[in-house]
Each structure stands twice: as C-alpha cells, then as structure tokens.
Amino acid sequence: MTAFRGACQKPRMPSFVKACSADEIPPGAGKTVTVNGKEYAIFNVEGTFRAIDNECPHRGGPLGEGELEGCLVTCPWHAWEFDLTSGESTTDDLTVTCYDVKVEDGTVLVIV
C-alpha cells in the first residue's frame, strides 16, 4: 500500500514579501510587480497601498497599468472598473482578489 505524503503536511502560512520600494509608486499611480512568480497590481491611493490580482477577469487585461481614480482602477483594455478595497467590479459581477499590504522602512510588502 502506498501512502500519500501530502495529506499530512501543514498548510503554508501566508507571509509578507517585498514587492517594491514605496517611492516607485507615487500617489494616484499603480505598478505591476511579480512576487514568487505571481503578478500583482499595487496602487498608491493617497498614501495607502492596495494590492489586487493583476489580471482582469473579463479578458485578462493588466490592471496594474489601469487608470486610478480614488479607490477604483479601470482596466486599460475594456474599461472595466474594480474597487481596490473589495475587489468587486462596478461594471459586472466579476471580482479580483485583494491582498493585504503593509509598508515598512519604505518597502511595500504584500502577503503571499
């Protein structure tokens, strides 16, 4: 009989990982970063940093390149809007995942 080793492994605890320097994203702007092979869209909303999945669920557009207005980002491909605080679309019922972000010593950290 063969045992499945993965069944007893503890799940990996999420941790904060460096995404970029805070001064790389001025207020009102966004940036796409890759952390551990995954793309995140990180935005500076009046000094508060927010992170979501970079890929728009509508057609795969790069949300990190979208226009930011308040807490709403507009996908540059088809103008779908997403709320950075909830991940909900104001255009349809699609959502993107939001990730916890913190800034320490001028470094933006995202939870992975």
Image: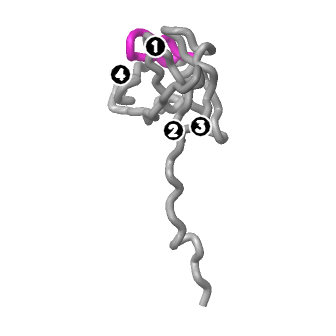
Q: CA distance from mark 3 to mark 2?
A: 6 Å
> In the displayed structure, would residue 6 be above or below residue 12?
below
Residue 50 image position (x, y, % from top left): 46, 24
Q: Secondary structure at mark 3?
A: strand
The mark closer to the camera, 4 or 3, is 3
The residue type indicated by label 2 comes to Ile
Say if residue 60 shows up in the picture. Answer: no
* Residue drawn at x 52%, y 25% as measured from the top left: 103
Q: CA distance from mark 4 to mark 2?
A: 27 Å
Dot placed on the residue nearer the N-terminal end, 3 or 2: 3
The residue type indicated by label 4 comes to Thr
Q: CA distance from mark 1 to mark 2?
A: 18 Å
Task: Determine whether label 3 and label 2 are within 8 Å by CB.
Answer: yes
Q: Please tell me the numbered disc located at residue 91.
A: 4
> In the displayed structure, would residue 107 be above or below residue 95?
above
Dot placed on the residue nearer the N-terminal end, 1 or 3: 3
* Residue drawn at x 58%, y 23% as measured from the top left: 105
* Residue that carries the numbered disc 1 in the rendered image: 47
Task: Judge by depth and name the residue closer to the eye, 16 or 81.
Answer: 16
The residue type indicated by label 3 comes to Val
The answer to which quarter of the image holds residue 45 is top left
Colour scheme: one colour
Say if residue 49 shows up in the picture. Answer: yes
Q: Which residues are magenta?
A: 65-76
Q: Is residue 6 magenta-colored? A: no
Task: Determine whether label 4 and label 2 are within 8 Å by CB.
Answer: no
* Residue that carries the numbered disc 3 in the rendered image: 17
Question: In the picture, which quadrant includes the C terminus?
Answer: top right
